[in-house]
Image (spheres, rainbow, N blue to C red):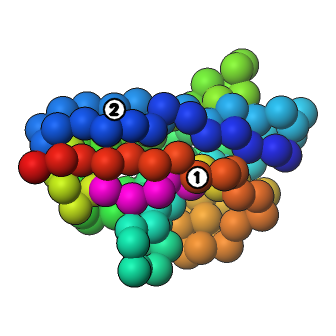
Amino acid sequence: VQLQASGGGLVQAGGSLRLSCASSGRTFGTHATGWFRQAPGKEREFVAARSSGGGITYYADSVKGRFTIARDNAKNTVYLQMSSLKPEDTAVYYCAASGVSSSTLRAGVVDYWGQGTQVTVSS
C-alpha cells in the first residue's frame, strides 16, 4: 500500500481545509486508515482513524467535533475534513494505514505511512 497525501496549505484561524490521501494499493479496502500530525518540536500524535469498513471512528480529544475522517473505498482514498481550525492545529499531517484495526492504528501501530502535508493556521 502506497499512500499519497495532499490538500495542505495556509488558512486563517476559523477556516477549513480538506486533506486527501490516495492509495495505489489494491488492499486499501482491508486496511484501517487514519491521520497523525507532528508540530515543530513535538512528537507525532494521533488525530483520527476509521476502520476498513468505515463503521468505527476514533478522534483525538483535541480535534473531536471539528475534524471528520471519511473514506471512499471505491476511490482508495481517505479524507480529513478540518473545520474551525486553530493555530495549534499547525503541523505536518501524515496519513497512515494498518492491516490490523482502527484501534491499533490509534495506538500508533502503523503498517504504512504517507508523506506529510503541511497545514499552517494563522491567527
Helix, strand or loop at label 1? It is loop
Give the x, y percent position of residue 52: 67, 43
How many numbered tags mark residues here?
Answer: 2
Residue 84 lies within the magenta run = no
The residue under the point 61% across, 40% down is: 5
Reading the image, the residue beneath label 2 is 17
- In the image, 93: left or right of 41? right
Image height check: is 34 above or below 68? below
Pick whichever, 40 or 94, lies toward us: 40
| Number of other residues with Cα within 10 Å of mark 1, as a class: few under 14, some 14 to 19, many 20 or more | some
Q: Amino acid at mark 2?
A: Leu
Give the x, y percent position of residue 112: 76, 58
Image height check: is 116 above or below 21? below
Question: Is residue 70 among the parts visible in the rendering?
Answer: no
Q: Tell me which corner region of the image, top left, top right, bottom left or bottom right, holds residue 67.
A: top left
Numbered tag placed on residue 116 in the rendering: 1
- In the image, 38: left or right of 17? right
| Number of other residues with Cα within 10 Å of mark 2, as a class: few under 14, some 14 to 19, many 20 or more | some
Determine the main secondary structure of the stretch shown in magenta.
strand
- In the image, 110: left or right of 28? left
- Magenta span of residues: 90-94
Labels 1 & 2 near each other (Cβ < 8 A): no
The residue under the point 46% across, 80% down is: 43
Which badge, 1 or 2, comes first in the chain's sequence?
2
Question: Is residue 89 among the parts visible in the rendering?
Answer: yes
Give the x, y percent position of residue 34: 56, 51
The residue under the point 18% across, 47% down is: 122
